[in-house]
Amino acid sequence: AQHFGRAADAGPAQSTGLWDYFWRAVTRNYFNFADRARRKEFWAFCLFWTISVIAVVAIGLAADAAIGDLEPGQEMPAMTVGLCGLFILASIPPWIGLIVRRLHDIGLTGWLAILCFIPTIGGLATLVFALIPTQTRENQWGPVPQGVKRSAPSCV
């Protein structure tokens, strides 16, 4: 007998809100290169990562203004550059993990994430990977992510 739906002993379902996707990426999935990530998860991470960068820049500029490091003619503001650099370095592992999981979700090997490091081509490749719909069936990297409608079984 085939069981449809979630098993009673599986516990509560994970929230699939946009913030929850971002929070899971920077906590539980920080070094996760094994599962699948649907489009909603990818774009939620992009949204909140961008908001986070804006917040880090604002905090850095406020700190630089407070210590008088924003004078005209001076070099780059140290606090802003330092905070942005730390944030971007800290967010590299979840970004790579997310891209690998996104590739798994569309049925491709995670090694294609290497394309993302090629200037110009990398951004285009990442965009294409992010726009391809989720495979609506289980693949070698796991079951269909929660919230994705499964395709009907084929009669072939």
Image (cartoon, rainbow, N blue to C red):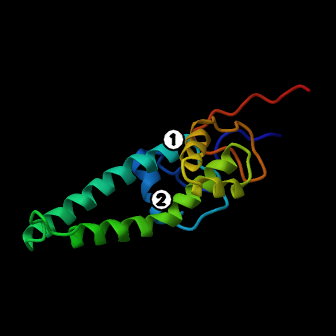
The quadrant of the image that shows the C terminus is top right
Hey, which quadrant is residue 35 in on the image? bottom right
Contact? badges 1 and 2 (CB < 8 Å): no
Q: Position of residue 154 (x, y in %)?
A: 84, 28
Indicate which disc residue 18 carries.
none
Residue density around tag 2, few if under 14, some if 14–19, many if 20 or more, within 10 Å? some
Q: Is residue 47 above or below residue 87?
A: above
Q: Residue furthest top?
A: 155
Give the amino acid at mark 2: Arg
Q: Which mark is residue 40?
A: 1
Residue beneath the point at 56% across and 55% down: 98
Image quadrant holding the N terminus, namely top right
Find residue 13 and report its horizontal and vertical position in percent. 53, 50
52 and 69: which one is in front? 69
Looking at the image, the residue that sits furthest to the right is 156
The image shows residue 71, relative to residue 133, as above or below, that is: below
Q: Give residue 18's position: percent from left, percent from top.
A: 42, 45
Q: Which secondary structure lies at badge 2?
A: helix
N-term mark: 1 or 2? 2
Residue 88 as seen in the image, left or right of residue 2 = left
Q: Indicate whether 71 appears above or below 151.
A: below
Amino acid, disc 1: Lys
Distance, label 1 to label 2, CA atoms, is: 13 Å
